[in-house]
Image: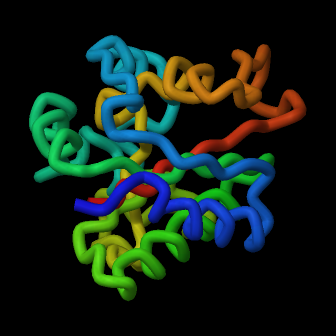
Amino acid sequence: MPGLADFEKYAEMARGLGAEHAVVLAAADVALDGRAYLKCRYGCGGWDRNWTCPSAPGALKPWEFEPLLRRYAGGVLVHSNDKKQCHEISFEVERAAYLDGHYFAFSMSDCALCEECTYPHAPCRDARRARPAMQGMGIDVFATVKKRNLPLEPLASEDAKPQNWYSLVLIA
């Protein structure tokens, strides 16, 4: 299994692509908490409105995700002030890790690929690059980010600034 130091090149890549921050972390440092799913289910205005939501048919649930997370060595936590940029960077890092032989590399990011999701009326337009949000998998994003001393505070409104978006690229 690769060491975490081997993942630093992916963090450097993310920063080179425009990430505000990108840090390597061990899978054990990803904070799981079922309450994240609870807030996702009952606090998100996007619940049951997109293909990457845990409410979508066949979507992985947090209790199914936890044993999978433990199979990863770690990954790269990506921070951007732009949601779409964060998604794009994490997908590029995932792709690079995959091409380097880490074939189970997997990014999680609030999907920002389409202006409007086709859910549930038509199949996902970009299912190859669509990814679930960390909180939908039961990850406590606040606790995970705070362990790395990165910026993240609750916002009073959806248009408050600065926006701090995070993605996680898991690497086996």
| Closer-to-camera residue (146/12) | 12
Q: Is residue 80 above or below residue 116?
A: above
Say which residue appears at 56% left-offset and 67% top-offset. Answer: 10
Nearest the viewer among 144 and 114 is 144
Quarter of the image where one finds residue 149: top right
Left or right placement of residue 11 versus residue 149 in this view:
left
Residue 48 appearing in the image = yes
Residue lying at 61% horizontally and 51% vertically, measured from the top left: 78
In the picture, which quadrant includes the N terminus?
Answer: bottom left
Q: Which residue lies at the image location 39% right of the left edge and 31% below the top edge?
A: 30
* Relative side of 91 to 170, left or right: right
Where residue 31 appears, as percent x and y from the top left, is 38, 23
Q: Relative to residue 52, is residue 58 drawn left or right?
A: left
Q: How many marks?
A: 0
> Relative to 7, is 81 on the left or the right?
right
Which residue occupies the foreground of this view, 147 or 128? Answer: 147
Can you name the residue that lies furthest to the right here? 161
Expressed as whole percent of the image width and height from the top left, the position of residue 64 reads 10, 37
